[in-house]
Image: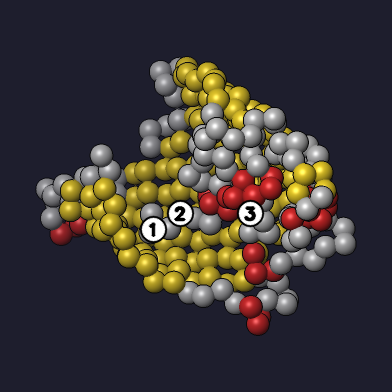
Amino acid sequence: YGVSRPSPETQIIPSTWREIGAGLFGSFFDDTLSYKLYAMNGLDAAGFSSSGYRGGRQKGRARLANDWAVVARLDWIPIDGLLVGGSVWSGGSGQDQTVGGIALGKVWTTIFELHAEYEWQGLKLRALYTQSHVGNAGQLSDARGETIASRSLGGYVEAGYNILPWIFPDTDMRLEPFYRFEWTETQNKVPNGYVANEYDNFRVNTVGLQFYPHPQVVLKADYRNEHALGRNSRGNQRPDKFQMGVGYVF
């Protein structure tokens, strides 16, 4: 739902995220339990910032592969309409680099998440929690010249409902109002001697509407009320946003 991805899925989980690697995947018990296990090149810690790890993506291009990572995911469908699962990514991000005259070291990075989705008739519910841990965060902060947190966390819950069948019972079109609450703290725990940038710890309330005139086309509009957390964030508030978008799936 929404014109923008939830912030925890862009700033802590750096979606859209693609890397070079190889692995295994499969399912058991009539596809109700599925797994994925991959090895791939690590992130680039030189791109980390106080707002998260999105700049550390290498996007599958021929760049740095001195440090590698593993990722595993498990999903379970205990009953029709309900999916629960989790995943973890862990590996080095330093890539044998020196930034600002400081060797980054291994910068071991771990990101994990837990998620759940439920669909029943026109109702859709979704929830996610994610947390990350970065080693050598103080050394990396010295090299980058900004506060890189040793721990970040965030999550969201959202709900939407297709109300169009109430008006046109036989239509294939959908009209779905939705609500999402999310919070993101990319500065949850910072290295000794550093001060958290409280602008990067925030919560968001989003209300919106999605209209599907065709199963592969969506028109979107939403309003995001963003609020920075922390006692010292009052003079550095985040702006509210009104957004519109069009999506096409092929």
Task: In the displayed orientation, state which residue is furthest to the front.
Answer: 101
Given residues 46 and 231, the one toward you in this image is: 46
x then y, percent, for residue 177: 32, 61
Disc 1 target residue: 2
Disc 3 target residue: 52
Is 238 positioned to the left or the right of 42 in the image?
A: left
Disc 2 target residue: 5
Q: Residue at x 82, y 43 (%)?
A: 103
Q: In this rendering, is residue 147 above or below 82?
A: below
Image mark for residue 153? none
Q: Quadrant of residue 154?
A: bottom right
Q: Which of marks 3 and 2 is in front?
A: 3
Quarter containing the N terminus: bottom left
x then y, percent, for residue 69: 66, 30
Q: Residue at x 23, y 45 (%)?
A: 216
| Residue 153 in view of the camera | no
Q: What residue type is labelled 1?
A: Gly
x then y, percent, for residue 196: 75, 65
Q: Which residue is drawn at 46% across and 19% down?
A: 27
Determine whether the residue tagged by mark 3 lies in a helix, strand or loop: loop
Tag 3 and tag 2, C-beta contact below 8 Å = no
Quarter containing the C terminus: top left
Q: In this rendering, is residue 67 above or below 101?
A: above
